Amino acid sequence: MSRIRKGDTVEVIAGNDRGARGEVLRVLPKKERVVVSKVNIITKHQSAQRAGRANMQVGRIQFEAPIHISNVMLVCPHCNAATRVGYRILDDGRKVRFCRKCGETID
């Protein structure tokens, strides 16, 4: 079970975008990275030759680059604070995430 999932709101705790909050667009578990909206924006220069026959964009393309999962922290939807994630097993056998600050379940 992953601590951070697609659709979660996270806060960047290290790097140039420190303090920025955004929604997780993609999780890359094998590389231990996440793509967060409006965080870690990079510019790639793409030539027409490189674009080839596909309908790719030409020129300067800005997009969100992946950021290491250790540099982001989950924002609790209940207390609106960046928090560590804990796990609980409920009575019905489900494993759920919970906020370490307020104790509320996140899932």
Image: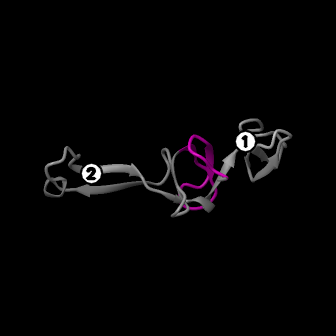
Place of residue 106 in the rendered image (x, y in percent of width and height, measured from the top left): 73, 40
Place of residue 28 in the rendered image (x, y in percent of width and height, measured from the top left): 51, 56
Query: Residue at coordinates 19% horizontally, 43% vertically from top-left?
Result: 55
Query: Residue at coordinates 77% horizontally, 38% vertically from top-left?
Result: 79
Report the side of 91 relative to 29 (left or right): right
Label ID, residue 21:
none
Q: Residue furthest front?
A: 92
Query: Residue at coordinates 86% horizontally, 40% vertically from top-left?
Result: 91
Type of amino acid under label 2? Arg
Work out whether 90 lies above or below 13: above
Depth order, front residue of 8/47: 8
Residue that badge 1 annotates: 76
Depth order, front residue of 95/75: 95
Type of amino acid under label 1? Cys
Work out whether 64 lies above or below 91: below
Label 2: state its secondary structure. strand
| 4 drawn magenta | yes
Separation of marks 2 and 1 at Cα, in angstroms:
36 Å
Residue that badge 2 annotates: 60
Label 1: state its secondary structure. loop
Q: Main secondary structure of the magenta part?
A: loop
Residues drawn in magenta? 3-24
Colouring of the image: one colour
The crowd level at tag 2 (other Cα within 10 Å; few <14, some 14-19, many 20+) is few
Quadrant location of the C terminus in the rendered image = top right
Report the side of 105 relative to 13 (left or right): right
Earlier in the chain: of badge 2 and badge 1, it is 2
The crowd level at tag 1 (other Cα within 10 Å; few <14, some 14-19, many 20+) is many
Report the side of 36 relative to 46 (left or right): right
Place of residue 46 in the rendered image (x, y in percent of width and height, measured from the top left): 23, 55
